[in-house]
Image (spheres, rainbow, N blue to C red):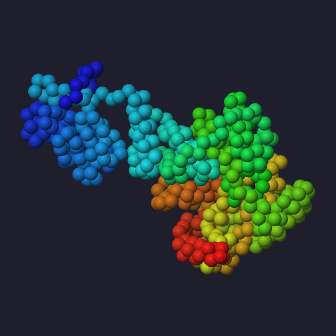
Amino acid sequence: MAASTFTSRMDLVKACTLEQLKAGKGIFVLKNGRKQIAVFQGKGEIHACNNRCPHEGYPLKVGTLTEGCILTCNWHNWKFNLATGETLVGGDQLRRYPVSVKGGAVWLDLAEPAPEQRIARATDSLREAFEDFDYDRMARELARLEQAGADPLDGLRHTVRWSHDRFEYGMSHAQAAAADWLALRADRGRGRTKQLVPLLETVAHFSYDTLRQPCHPYPEEAIEFEAHGLVRAIEAEDEATAIGHVRGALAAGLGFAALERPLTEAALAYFQDFGHSIIYVYKTRLLSERLGSTVLEPLLLPLVRSLVYARREDLIPEFKAYAPALAAWDGKGGAAVGAEDFRGLSVRRALALTVSASGDRGRLYDALFGTLAWNMLHYDIAMQARADNAISRNVGWLDFTHGITFANAVRVQCGRHADLWPKGLLQMACFAGRNAGFLDWEGEGSAADWRVDNPMAFFEDTFDTLFDHGQIEHIVACHYIKTVTAAHAECRNAPDASWVSTLAAALNRLINSPLKRRHAARTARQALDFVAAEG
């Protein structure tokens, strides 16, 4: 029986008499507002705790109390030491209440711990759930953190700090999608459930992407920040120098605004990393604006690492025409082009046409974006079912959604740094030409099949489904929210564009079509072929 010093008579509550406790065979449940508190009498000791198991809320009054004050919830075998408060089997902590006996009655102290104590406890518990990738518990701990009085976004801020040095090759989709999840929460999160879902999805994605990953520390030395030096270091794959520039900028009190230009320049320096680089820069800016300067460093370090390790697609034969096209760009091309002019063109021909139309960037962007939307609508979905294709033809839905999210990032970031438009537009042409070989021109991917009468209303309905998307893989859920967010942004930016209905139809087809994620037969056959060719 725990001793207690009562500081407020309002917190001191009579639970029951000793006779009532005896009549209940050592168990009594006190209902106090929404609280249910179970009182247990063991061998000479009385303990009180939340009657609801912290796992899923089943009543502990019908649990089993054994010698040593060990209380077992019989639904899932979670076990708690009522004397110490330790959770022996399970995860969450059980709330206990100090007990005293006075005048033949059991009295409970229901005083709440200080807010800072509750927040600290919830934060520690969230980290435990994060380390275990316990989705359900992460949800509970995020709810407890907010209930304790913390800023709801603090759970995500902690997550960014806990995980940033576990990304061996830098930023993943977890950080990129976080910006879109938070926008969904801010713009459409009506009600407590819809406020929690985006935070849960984001924290869980970080947890999954770093699960069982060791620490991959970043170089510690800071050097005097110089924008061109940062770009050169990234291009040279010199992580130590690149990180040094970032640390130097932060040490000098510079924020993301000072780093955005060189990071954007580095992200668009080449056709690289399947468009991830510029998307990651754009989303890091948005995420840092949401979360604030306290997590700027752990957001920037994995971003820079990802830029350092970005793969150079412009060096492979398929895209060898990119560098000559960039060299030929003079911004004076007078060809008047539309989306239909790019349909079916190879990478080389799409790049040449882009250069010929370089004099009108707005019209050229519109034509290229319309092509990317049309390509997505007409993706040959049979490609994802094939098991006899070469590795170079392992093409799925995400190859097409990336064209949309990449273009959205290009428009926004090049709009802020106009001299980078040539690279952004030519790289959009690379996307358009590359995906042109995987289209179903006459099959199910037609505008009539997937037509949306009211595109903007369709986007709102689609956003709403994301609060309960049902996808087990975080990578799939994040691509859905990224694609919907990018498509919606483009339609809002150009509501009268000719491609709006095409894009809405393409998105409608995506979310209503199968998305094959495991290719067992294809992987096995390609592995056998590869090993056989090794001799």
94 displayed left or right of 403: left
Q: Position of residue 64 (x, y in %)?
A: 19, 47
Q: Is residue 78 above or below residue 32?
A: below
Q: Position of residue 507 (x, y in %)?
A: 61, 64
Q: Quadrant of residue 491?
A: bottom right
Q: Quadrant of the N terminus?
A: top left
Q: Position of residue 249 (x, y in %)?
A: 71, 34
Q: Residue furthest front?
A: 535
417 displayed left or right of 532: right
Tell me which residue sits at (62%, 74%) in the image: 531
Q: Is residue 222 above or below residue 25?
A: above
118 displayed left or right of 75: right
Which of 284 and 128 lies nearest the eye of the viewer? 128
Q: Is residue 127 visible?
A: yes
Which of 531 and 373 lies nearest the eye of the viewer? 531
Tell me which residue sits at (50%, 59%) in the image: 473
124 displayed left or right of 458: left
Tell me which residue sits at (24%, 42%) in the image: 51
Q: Is residue 404 visible?
A: no
Which of 513 and 2 lies nearest the eye of the viewer? 2
| Numbered circles on residues, count | 0
Q: Quadrant of residue 385?
A: bottom right
Q: Quadrant of the C terminus?
A: bottom right
Which of 324 and 371 lies nearest the eye of the viewer? 324
Q: Is residue 392 above or below residue 158?
A: below
Q: Is residue 352 above or below residue 72?
A: below
Tell me which residue sits at (42%, 46%) in the image: 129
